[in-house]
Amino acid sequence: MPENPDRPGGAEAAPERPSPLATGPSRPPEEPGLSPSQVAERVAAGRTNDVPVRAGRTVAQIIRGNVFTRINAMIAVLFAIIAVIGPVQDGLFAMVILINTLIGIVQELRAKRTLDRLAIVNAARPRVVRGGAVVRVAAQEIVLDEVLEVGVGDQIVVDGAVTWSGGLEVDESLLTGEADPVVKKPGDTVMSGSFVVAGTGRFRATKVGRHAYAARLAEEASRFSLVHSELRSGINRILTWITYALFPIGGLLVYSQLFMGGHVTLDEGAAGGQVSGPLADALRGMVAALVSMIPEGLILLTSIAFAVGVIRLGRYQCLVQELPAIEGLARVDVVCTDKTGTLTEVGMKMAEIRDLGGGPADGPTPTAVLAALTAHDPDPNASMAAIAQGMRAGGHRAPDWEPTAQAAFSSARKWSGMGFRTPEGDVNWVLGAADVLAPGHAASSEAARLGAQGLRVLLLGRSSLRVDDPRAPGEVEPVALVVLDQKVRADAAPTLDYFAEQGVDVKIVSGDHAASVGAVGRGLGLPGADRPVDARELPGDPAELGLRVDGHSAFGRVTPERKRDMVRGLRDRGHTVAMTGDGVNDVLALKEADIGVAMGSGSPASRSVAQLVLLDDRFAVLPRVVAEGRRVIGNIERVASLFLTKTVYTMVLATVVGLLAVSYPFFPRHATLINAVTFGIPSFFLALAPNTDIARPGFVARTLRLAVPSGMVAGLAAVTTYLLVLGGRTVPDPADRTAVVITLCTTTLWVLLLVAKPYVWWKVVLVGSMVGLLTLAMATPLGRWFFDLDVSDPAKVLTGLAVAGAAIAVITVIRVVDDRAIARAEARAAQEAERVDALV
């Protein structure tokens, strides 16, 4: 039954259409459920299912999480020092605390609102019996003693005791690990967090809210958390290293500069009572060095990139339930997708009924049997709904037969059935996969032939056993083939083409006949779909299973357990796997995959375990998710290279200056200027820029591979310029400091150009604007006064430029040599992969 999220909940909710159970083979007992007054009484007593729709961070938690960070603590301590010794210009770097915090809070609040809004719209609305009518309510509005009605695909949201069962089977694998469905009879217990895989039923709520078994698990699982992310863990590791380096370098700078002698004095003429003297100068130098070592914008830009990615995807009706899922899907190299509802339209139409001539000559016609089956099915699936529509369109009425037994459809057994008391006696009919019900029969071969054309074929047959017998279906006498036509989604082929271009393997994993799966794959141009595999023939050994799955692209007759094993086998072979699905049969595989992607109209169970939910059921949205993830990863990697280059050159400069016992060449205001025009402002734009680079593991190693040599060359270049312009002195003048600023800015702007590849017009404009800002600061009287710059000595300016030119040449040579080494390594890896594939 499709959900209508716009319908208001609560006891006043509009009644549903008549319950599908009302026409079942054994009707549920007449029970009025709770009355409005009983519901109100329980609500007043607090006996409601008061579990938040989404346990995201509160506003207070968001504010605390963005204010009290390691970066902010470091900056705050350094600012406190400058606040005491002055001047105010040297405290400009503290603006990063305000900017980081405000942008982080605003972006996360926007993301929170988007996520919460999407989650509320998409929230499951269980069916309850109130006042004798079946209504839908929000899960939070269920009260104790509520009577709930469930069918295939419904998730059980509270604990309860079964009051009526129509072949009810519940999958409790998410709670107990047991993969086999559990048959539930009246009096049995059902637990929240499980879901219905077959049949229908009703149960009375015995535990609601945080008392329910799965509420604790669900609340913990849905709470805002930073799950494993290579980006986040890599950045945190780098920050830890930097933190350890701050103390010895800061101590060395202060000690070396105090060792030069002097005492603290107060410059009465300084604006604002600026403290001067060796200690004050030593502290300013230390602050300038440590501020440059701290990659203050890296965490901010990472958070912004993720948050903006969530908001962008929300516009395409993609609900991101865990932020790192964007990064995870970008790293995916195998996508396993269901066929029905993902590559093909959910709805089907009946094409024909092919009478096989089975059964007694005076027996009922296949159309009469199908009309009876559809009329008494309490919870029809898509195939049965298509048959029912065909029966109505053909004017076929159901005979007056009394149902005697029922077996709900299960994706594990691939058939459903119903027994009837007819004029010729009790007869049991089954409807399902021909190769399962009648293996080796001519009907099975014909069904395979039709399935190879992309049709969905079901076998109607007479069973020798009651359908509810544990040994059912027993011997099956084929009577007719029911041919259903399935329509391939218009956007499926372009989506598969995109994945092929991006080097992502797509594997169709379906419960349908392998030939039918292969036909759909061939129609979509999927490589390898002409060799479909019956999953029942796959080996049981995990290693061999993974090898076989890795080498094919179309699989049929896949059970839920086998689907999970296939995903696990691919992961064991080193693949990053995404699984898409919409039904309860996909839940185990969704949970096993690195990234689970559920369809919005699918079962609540599938949505509950997925990291991404495609609210409008469009498989074609996945390329946007992949592209967004690659944009985030690629851009953060670029930004990290820039910030770490700054960290490395500052460490080199500070260490050498400390060992030589000369004054640190910069004031904090100089560090603010350099950081802003070379990395700070450009990185903000680069972090949000388009990027289609394929995501690869090894974020930290690749980042350091560029940052360390570039930073060391830039730091040594700054030291060289400094020593040349000092000319043997130990205390620099403004012209000396300006020469070092020129060297560092010119060198690091070149690093920015290397990182910004490939070039487009706006990147050229961006770098040109930064050069313009730097020139403006040096050319205007206000800029020179504010940043304490002096360009009046041409010799020192030319010295800074000359050293920068040499440094640029060295960095370029290092980068070219490194790129060639990487290219050779990748070529060797590709050759090895081809050799392995050939052996396989």
Image (cartoon, rainbow, N blue to C red):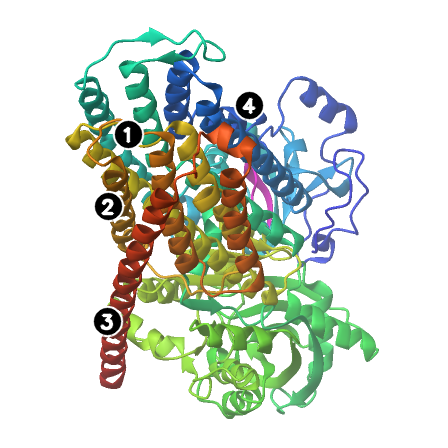
Quarter residue 558 falls in: bottom left
Q: How far apart in space, not on screen, are marks 4 and 3 (Cα)?
A: 49 Å
Instruction: Decide which of 600, 640 is in the foreground and name it.
Output: 640
Q: Foreground mark, 4 or 3?
A: 3
- The amino acid type found where label 2 is placed reads Leu
| Left/right of residue 370 with respect to residue 309 in the rendered view | right
In the image, 647 versus 747, the foreground residue is: 747
Classed neighbour count for the residue bearing mark 2: other residues with Cα under 10 Å, few (<14), some (14–19), many (≥20): some
Label ID, residue 716 = 2
The residue indicated by pointer 3 is 825
Q: Are marks 1 and 3 in contact (CB under 8 Å)?
A: no
Q: Secondary structure at mark 2?
A: helix
Residue 660 horizontal/vertical position (percent): 16, 32
**Between discs 2 and 1, the one toward the N terminus:** 1
Check residue 667 for magenta coloring.
no
Residue segment shown in magenta: 156-165
Q: CA distance from mark 2 to mark 4?
A: 45 Å
Viewed as shown, does residue 8 lie left or right of 189? right
Is any atom of residue 195 visible in this view?
no
Other residues around mark 4 within 10 Å, as few (<14) / some (14–19) / many (≥20): few
Could you tell which of marks 2 and 3 lies nearer the N-terminus?
2
Whether residues under marks 2 and 1 lie with C-beta atoms below 8 angstroms apart, the answer is no
Q: Residue tagged by mark 4?
A: 60
Q: Earlier in the sequence, mark 4 or mark 1?
A: 4
Instruction: Give the CA separation, mark 2 to mark 3.
Output: 30 Å
Sequence-wise, the earlier of marks 2 and 4 is 4
Secondary structure category for the residue under label 4:
helix
Residue 664: numbered disc: 1
